[in-house]
Amino acid sequence: MAGKRRVVITGLGVAAPVGLGIESFWDGLLERRCGLRGIEAFDASGLASRVGGELPEFQLGDSIPKTYRKSAKVMARDIVIAVVCAYHAVRDAGLRTKCIIERGEADGPSNVDSTRFGANIGSGLICADLQELAGALATSVDEDGAFSLARWGVEGMNNLTPLWLLKFLPNMLACHVTIVHDCQAPSNTITCGEASSHLAIGEAFRTIARGAADVCICGGAESKMNPMAVARAMLLGRLNTKSNDDPKGACRPFGAGRCGTVAAEGGGLTIIESLDHARARGARIYAEVAGFASTSNRYSWSRPDPQGRPIALALGRALSDAGIVSGDVSLAVPDGLGLDEHDAAEARAWKSVLGEHLPRIPALSTRGANGNCGAGAGVLEFSAMTMALHRNTVPASLNTDRLDAECAFRFVQADPIDSAIDYAVSTSSALAGGQSSALVIRRFKE
């Protein structure tokens, strides 16, 4: 893209089972913490898979102005996670947004033009509040105890708040985040499963590069810690049902004999901005976004191409977009959800693009520690990748000690290693829908 503006990463806001906030998340990876355990969010005793990744306790009120707390009534769990991540991201970036000023956490006027502040946020299938819905349904039965549509219309619906539906629309994550922080530039919601947050970051990168915004908050969030999400993934054969007594070993990215992923909740939002804007406000720069590409899987909407061709195509195009070749990559950050077919396809894709270079460079995966939080999954890898480059350190990747024979990744197994990283690459693919994407970041140099 001729004349495109340089785009840098200045803020990271993360909510993951291993930690809330980027420093806690990073410390969790360095310390090899595992956030997977027996599900406590609901009674999972009747399910075959009873392991999940739940977030540490937090209070929404710590992330929004007092004047906005009434809006919490129309926030589903996914929305709450996104709003909390947004607060951590703008704080980490040193942005004086509307929220930060109203909370009394910054002196002086805003240092970002709201009309040039955009948002791209990935969202999943938000689960309805089953207890709330069940209470309304209970008032809609007839004398024989059967559900009555007529009574639902007369009585049942009246037991739900008139704004009930607003809690479960996927665009509400971006809606609340943009209102709280006064983001008035282009805003978009992406609902492409596990690929969502990579696609959101990539689209925000393009938005800034072409001059349509100066700053964007981007990423994704989703909670799969509810009965419907766990049951759905279990029925589709995606969850590990054999490790209920060993939660820490349940999710094994690219592992030999792997038998499924683990449902989780979490995500993250990232602040990216034009280099000129970041310089003007004296921002700390983590890294520069260098390349992005996305592809679709024509093999199947629900199964990966066995050779990983869509992933390989996205990976190769992202490297080309960054103006580099495979030998320039110094950190590989694959998706690796612990699913047999998907991991095998991804491993083949990386090997086909990076070839002999792949076993020579360190690799990083956070899935063994955090599980799969859908639309929020990719941004956890992106945040870990950014911190690894920024700190010249690669943490261990849990449960990667026994890899599939075809897997050529060199994951760190014990203590973190020092590694000078110039270019890092991450891939992400949707389990259903066929979208794949790749992001390249590089060490920032003037």
Image (cartoon, rainbow, N blue to C red):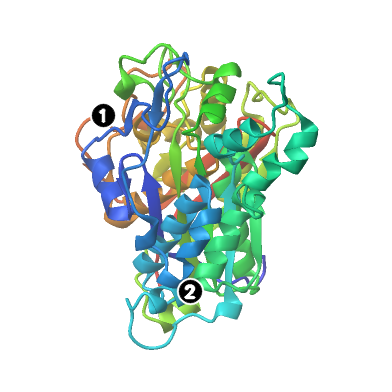
Q: Is residue 284 above or below residue 258?
A: below
Give the residue at x 59% y 17%: 235
Q: Is residue 22 left or right of residue 187?
A: left
Q: Which residue, as the protein is rendered here, is positioned at the far bottom?
A: 108
Residue in the foreground of this view, choosing between 235 and 368: 235
Question: In x, y percent, where is residue 398?
Answer: 31, 29
Residue 19 visible at all: yes
Q: CA distance from mark 2 to mark 1?
A: 36 Å
Question: In x, y percent, where is residue 121?
Answer: 57, 55
Give the residue at x 45% y 64%: 69
Looking at marks 2 and 1 on the same chain, the residue that comes earlier in the sequence is marked by: 2
Q: Amino acid at mark 2?
A: Leu
Residue designated by label 1: 413
Residue in the foreground of this view, choosing between 43 and 240: 43
**Residue 150 figure quarter:** top right
Q: Which residue, as the protein is rendered here, is positioned at the far right?
A: 150
Which of the labelled discs sits on residue 85, or is there none?
none
Question: In x, y percent, where is residue 350?
Answer: 52, 33
Question: In x, y percent, where is residue 190?
Answer: 64, 50
In which quadrant of the rendered image does the C terminus lie? bottom left
Give the residue at x 43% y 56%: 85
Q: Amino acid at mark 1?
A: Gln
Q: Is residue 2 above or below residue 75?
A: below
Residue 170 visible at all: no
Q: Is residue 277 above or below residue 234?
A: below
Q: Is residue 122 above or below residue 213?
A: above
Assess disc 1: are there few (<14), some (14-19) or many (≥20) residues with their C-alpha within 10 Å of its C-alpha: some
Under circle 1, the secondary element is loop
Residue designated by label 2: 275
**Residue 367 figure quarter:** top left
Assess disc 2: are there few (<14), some (14-19) or many (≥20) residues with their C-alpha within 10 Å of its C-alpha: many
Give the residue at x 28% y 52%: 392
